[in-house]
Amino acid sequence: MTRSRLLTAATATALALTLGVFGGSAQAADPHVAPGGNFDLAIWQLQEPVGSPGAPTTIPSSRLRGANGYQDAYFYTDTRDGAMTFWAPEKGVTTPNSNYARSELREMNRDGGAADWKLSGSHRLSATLRVVSVTKNVCVGQIHLGSGGSSTKPLAELYYRANGDIVLGTEDSPSGGQTTHPVGHVPLGKTWTYTIAVTGGNTIELTVNGTTTRYAIPSAFSPYRQYFKAGSYNQSSSDSTTNGAKVGFYGLTVSHS
């Protein structure tokens, strides 16, 4: 098994002691360094809600790493609690296949290539986070289709809605259509955890605050490889640059076996 630890052992211990009970505030890391000083960002690439129409700016992992790594108004360390923070306003540059702006990490390999793993085996994305603000709805984690076909859809998206509901969206087929599943509720601003995983090649396994649910993966997805995404993928749009979704992460790990 290979595992990317995105917090040091000391930081993880401090985080566990600070969190105590889900819903509390978190003192996650050093608030005076860039996100790359607290998190191992060697397996991530950042996409931001700026750039040219249809071509958002991307920041490679080489620029994200280290205490003096990349940060700006859309991706930064919260100086109050050390959270790796993602801000996506309702008005921003989007990809060609979306109407919504995002400040979001895309999984990469340590050699710099794009992650693109088979459904077989076990693949897990785990996070401790809180949604600081949201207008309507924000996606905070994804399993996304990679190579293997022409679809650009996600296999699964984990949403946090403005009323505090947490909802998993599973794609019906590579051609589209999404089924939503209520999976929890956390008040805005409170800390919570998730693990979103693929197991056995045919099952999505989701754990939110310790409660696990499983969903079958339709066979039409079998030819596709996958990769993880995490951050703030806003699910509403307008002409506002002040309304949007802000999400702070206190822990983020990926494992494959």
Image (cartoon, rainbow, N blue to C red):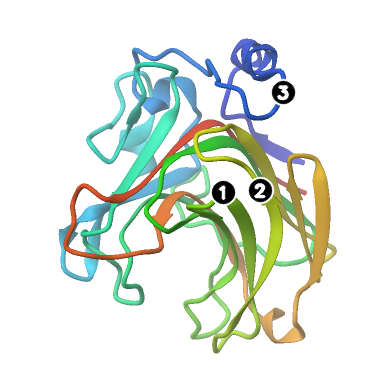
Nearer-the-camera pick, 153 or 233: 233
Estimate the x, y position of residue 256 in percent, counting from the top left: 71, 48
Q: Secondary structure at mark 2?
A: strand
Above-or-below relation of 9 to 126: above
Earlier in the chain: of badge 2 and badge 1, it is 1
Q: Quadrant of residue 236?
A: bottom left
Which residue is found at the position 25% from the left and 54% from the top?
A: 49
Amino acid type assigned to the residue bearing label 2 in the image: His
The residue singled out by tag 1 in the image is 164
The residue singled out by tag 2 in the image is 185
In the rendered structure, the answer to whether residue 150 lies left or right of residue 116 reads left
Which residue is found at the position 55% from the left and 35% from the top?
A: 129
Which residue is found at the position 36% from the left and 25% from the top?
A: 77
Amino acid type assigned to the residue bearing label 3 in the image: Val
Q: Quadrant of the N terminus?
A: top right
Q: In this figure, what is the number of numbered marks?
A: 3
Give the Cα separation between the discs numbered 3 and 1: 17 Å
Give the Cα separation between the discs numbered 3 and 2: 15 Å
